[in-house]
Image (spheres, rainbow, N blue to C red):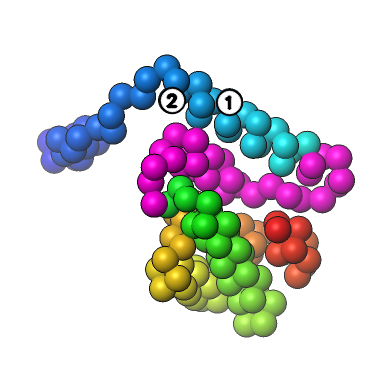
């Protein structure tokens, strides 16, 4: 019975209901943003897109007032986390504990610099998965 209560959200408040304008803004913003990045990836045969960008679009266009959704947080959160993943992969090695350290340090640095962007937390994991791209993966993301 406790499990069902947790699934229902333990009576936590739902986010406020979005109006039609907010839904349209989120839809159009996400459509344009991901379309541009996907087009660039396809056109230049370079990877300009990461899995975490979908979650970034949710925050940026769906919850634009959130501190995590501010351009400073989005840009520096992704840069810091991607850099940590690349640094640990290339200079420490492809080990499970290296990935764990990269992610933990990325979170710590985002907290210290006040640039926390939760979707960027997946970037070190993505970097370790995309090992065949090499060190230039970081620069392709900028």
Is 59 part of what is drawn in magenta?
A: yes
Please state which of residues 142 and 85 is positioned toward the viewer in this rendering: 142
Specify the label residue 42 is tagged with.
none
Overall secondary structure of the magenta stretch?
Answer: helix
Residue 26 screen position, x and y as percent: 50, 29
Label 2's element? Answer: helix
Q: Is residue 122 visible?
A: no
Q: Cα distance, mark 2 to mark 1?
A: 10 Å
Mark closer to the chain start, 2 or 1: 2
Residue 99 vertical placement versus 140 (above, below)? below
Q: Position of residue 73 (x, y in %)?
A: 49, 57
Left or right: residue 4 versus residue 22 is left
Identify which residue is drawn at 86% across, 40% down: 43
Residue visible at 64% across and 37% down in the picture: 33
State which region is magenta: 40-67
Tag 1: Cα neighbours inside 10 Å, few (<14), some, or many (≥20)?
Answer: few
Question: Quarter of the image containing the N terminus?
Answer: top left
Indicate left or right for 84 with 130 as reference: left
Task: Give the quarter of the image for residue 87.
Answer: bottom right
Q: Position of residue 42 (x, y in %)?
A: 82, 39
Is-magenta flag for residue 79?
A: no
Tell me the residue that label 2 is attached to. Answer: 22
Residue tagged 1: 28
Write down the quadrant of residue 130 in the picture.
bottom right
Q: The C terminus is located in which quarter?
A: bottom right
């Amino acid at each position: 019975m406790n499990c069902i209560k947790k699934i229902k959200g333990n009576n936590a408040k739902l986010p406020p209901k979005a109006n039609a304008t907010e839904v349209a803004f989120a839809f159009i913003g996400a459509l344009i943003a991901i379309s541009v990045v996907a087009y660039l990836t396809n056109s230049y045969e370079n990877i300009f897109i990461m899995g975490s960008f979908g979650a970034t679009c949710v925050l940026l266009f769906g919850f634009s007032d959130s501190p995590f959704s501010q351009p400073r947080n989005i840009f520096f959160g992704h840069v810091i986390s991607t850099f940590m993943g690349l640094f640990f992969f290339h200079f420490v090695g492809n080990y499970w504990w290296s990935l764990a350290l990269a992610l933990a340090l990325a979170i710590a640095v985002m907290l210290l610099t006040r640039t926390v962007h939760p979707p960027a937390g997946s970037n070190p994991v993505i970097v370790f998965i995309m090992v065949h791209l090499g060190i230039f993966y970081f620069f392709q993301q900028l």
